[in-house]
Amino acid sequence: MFAVLAKYRHVFLVGLQNNLVYRWNFAIRAGFSLLHLAFVFILWGAAYAGQTDIGGFDLRETLTYFVTVLILQFFISAMNEDYEVSEEIRNGLINQFLLKPVSYFGYRLTLFASARAVSGTLALVPILLALPLIAPHLSLPPLGWTWLAAVPALILSAFIQFTIAYCFGLLTFWFLEIQSFIILSLAVETILGGQVFPLDLLPAWLHDLSSYLPYYYMMYFPAAMLTGRITEPALAVQGLGMQLFWAVALFAICRLLWTRGLRRHTAVGG
Amino acid sequence: MSALAHYARLWLACARYSVVRTMMFRGDFIMWSLVELFWMGVNLAVIGVVYQHTDSIAGWGPWEMTLIVGTSMLVQRLLMGLFWTNLFEMGRNVRSGHFDFFLAQPGNPLFMVSTRKLDLDGFLNVPVAVAVIAYAAHRIGLDPTPAVIGAYALLVLLGLAIHYATLLIFISLVFWIQSARGIEGGYFGFNEFSRLPREALKGVAAVVMVYALPLVIVSNFPARTLIHGIEPLNIAWLAAAAALWLTVAVTVFNRGLRRYASASS
């Protein structure tokens, strides 16, 4: 057990070093995300002009939701993992994992954890710098059980994000080019993951429908828990149950794609 | 004149190659067209949801706002069709050393880098963006004259020049940093402001996004032209902004080019 952990600890440390090489890219990306935040503040500020309530939430609560989503993106979102898996399959780099006692899924998951540790930490820098400007427009709910319940929700969200990216990467076994699949899925995720508006602003039937899809649990669900948009324990438990279901289902799909994909894979060269 | 004809021939050759290549990968072409269509749907969905809860944003109703967003989409589709892939790949090529290939070609490096490929899927969605604009104009009850439509087209082209310059500046940063990974996001970050009405921006935001950077006016001026008719001052403003930003972008690219020392990997 300890030997296995030590193996992945090394992968994690190498991942940290690799990602620190691109520290400026992460920092610049995080800096640019403040532009998105400015856009959100201006758009929603104008939408709230003349009214105090949209969908049962005031402007500060809505802005808090968007800031939370922005921060979470750097900690739990899959960024380049799909492309990296795809490249490793295309270039034959996965061949080494077929011969060594290392799980490719475990290896990629560990690298994902290290990448998010770096990107999340670096993203906090511009956000902390901007905090004096944005803090007066935010209103966080008091610390309570939802924050505690948000911890497993965040871990499961990250896992769901990773498994979806991993599955898209594995499509390389069948398709030469997977970028269009990824960006198509990203468009759906942007809407149904609650990244451009809180999902509770959707018509009730669409909101209910989206709560059965994995996208709902990739970002909206943990962000809603942290920002007081989900306050009923029953809804939180139900959401965690659905998250667990999708995490297991997506893991099973990953396993299936890997097994089936390897049957098509040809390792060439030494 | 002969130089112009030379570049026109080069561009046509590249365009022909792009069309042939796209037709070889028809499934890919359909998928990318769908991708572009979905992203346009995302932008329209945001308007739809926001206007379910409010009647006006900075004095702009839902269809006026659709006109702004539609114009922004039109400029972006043109950018995607003509330049996006080329500049996106430039970011990767500088890092890998494949950029050498463009320096060895018979033409200005910036022209060769910017025009090698056309993305037909981007162009395929231009009519969709035009349809969105036409429908929004119909819902507002506009009946633009040919002169107004001509002025609108001119403003869209000036907007395209500004978008191209912005993207080129961002991608040219690759000459100074390790890679362009994530940098392209900066363009999309700035481009978001082109979906806002100018009146929504106040104070410092207005100074930066309207006056210092021409991000908001790129879509607002054409939309205003359709609604209120030709405003010469706005055309002059956008033309001056396009000239200025193109100059800055070309300067940044040329400075970067001087730093380029190929790569061995």
Image (cartoon, rainbow, N blue to C red):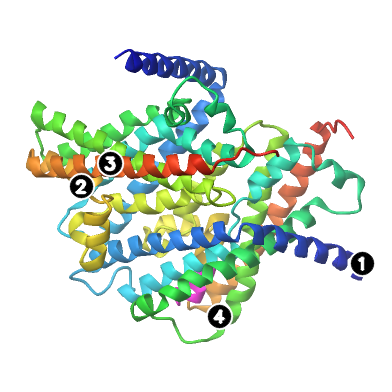
The kind of residue tagged 1 is Ala
Label 3 resides on the chain identified as B
* Mark 3–mark 2 distance (CA, rounded to whole Å): 11 Å
Dividing the picture into quadrants, the one containing residue A11 is bottom right
Q: Residue B26: x percent and y percent?
A: 54, 21
| Numbered badge on residue A3 | 1
Q: Name the residue under label 3.
A: B70
Q: Per the image, is A224 magenta? A: yes
Q: Name the residue under label 2.
A: B220
Q: In which quarter of the image is the C terminus of chain A?
A: top right
Whether residue A22 is visible, yes or no, is yes
Mark 4 or 1, which is nearer the eye?
Answer: 1
Q: Name the residue under label 4.
A: A147
- Residue under the image location 31 percent in, 41 percent down: B247
Q: Residue A210: x percent and y percent?
A: 49, 56
For the residue pair A250 and A118, the one nearer the viewer reads as A118
CB under 8 Å between discs 2 and 1: no
* Mark 2–mark 4 distance (CA, rounded to whole Å): 42 Å
- Structural crowding at the residue carrying mark 2, measured as other residues with C-alpha within 10 Å and reported as few (<14), some (14–19) or many (≥20): many
Q: Per the image, is A197 magenta? A: no
Label 2 resides on the chain identified as B
- Residue under the image location 55 percent in, 41 percent down: B260
Mark 3 or 2, which is nearer the eye?
Answer: 2
Mark 3 or 1, which is nearer the eye?
Answer: 1
Mark 3 or 4, which is nearer the eye?
Answer: 3
Dividing the picture into quadrants, the one containing residue B114 is top left
Secondary structure beneath dot 1 equals helix
| Residues rendered magenta in the picture | A222-229
